[in-house]
Structures are given as structure tokens and as C-alpha cells.
Image (cartoon, rainbow, N blue to C red):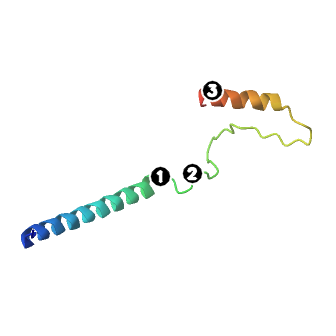
Amino acid sequence: MRIPYRRMMEALRFLLLFVTCTLLSYGIITLLSDKLLPSNPYDEPRGNAVKVVKLVNSPETQDLDGYLTRLQLFYVTGE
């Protein structure tokens, strides 16, 4: 069984067109994400930012019950 030359060329042309369109789409999406998304999302906020978490840096032993209830709440609700 022979595959005609014309059919092989159509398949090759389709493959090249597919790869070209895929690379072009990837390039456009990468360019847009670089322009729209911040470069470092974990940078220090500017303006009127409010600190959400208060870290406790004390040498005393801390109450683990509060942490355990918060962890259980996280597992139950996913928040």
C-alpha cells in the first residue's frame, strides 16, 4: 500500500501550519501575561495597604489549641 506524494505533502503542510499556529499562540499569550501580570506578586505593597496577619514573636510557649481549631476549620471549610 503506497501513500501518494500529494497526500504526504498535505499532511506535512498541515503539521507545519499547526506547529506555527501553536507557537504563535504561545508567544502571544506569553507576551500578554508579561504585560498584564505583575512581575513580582509578593513585593511589598504600596499605598494604603493593611497588614492582615499579625505574627507573634514571643519566647513564651504558645497555646496550640487556637492553632488546632483554626487548622480544623481550614480543613472543614477550605478557607
Q: Is 37 displayed left or right of 6 in the figure?
A: right
**Image quadrant assignment for residue 26:** bottom left
**Disc 1 marks which residue?**
37
Q: Residues within 10 Å of mark 2 (few under 14, many from 20)?
A: few
From the viewer's side, name the closer residue of 53 and 9: 9
**Image quadrant assignment for residue 78:** top right
Q: Earlier in the sequence, mark 2 or mark 3?
A: 2
Q: Are marks 1 and 2 in contact (CB under 8 Å)?
A: yes
Instruction: Give, as a three-letter code, the residue at label 2.
Output: Pro
Find the distance from the CA under tag 1 to the CA under tag 3: 32 Å
Name the spot of residue 9 as percent of width and height, x first: 12, 70
Name the spot of residue 39 as percent of width and height, x first: 53, 57
Instruction: Give, as a three-letter code, the residue at label 3.
Output: Val
Q: Is 27 displayed left or right of 47 in the figure?
A: left
**Can you say whether 24 is above or below 72 in the image?**
below
From the viewer's side, name the closer residue of 66 and 9: 9
Q: Residues within 10 Å of mark 1 (few under 14, many from 20)?
A: few
Q: Are marks 2 and 3 in contact (CB under 8 Å)?
A: no
Residue 4: mark: none
Find the distance from the CA under tag 2 to the CA under tag 3: 28 Å
**Can you say whether 18 is above or below 9 in the image?**
above
Residue 41: mark: 2
Q: Residue at x 31, y 63 (%)?
A: 23
The N terminus, quarter of image: bottom left
Residue 76: mark: 3
Secondary structure, mark 3, is helix
Name the spot of residue 28 as percent of width and height, x first: 34, 59
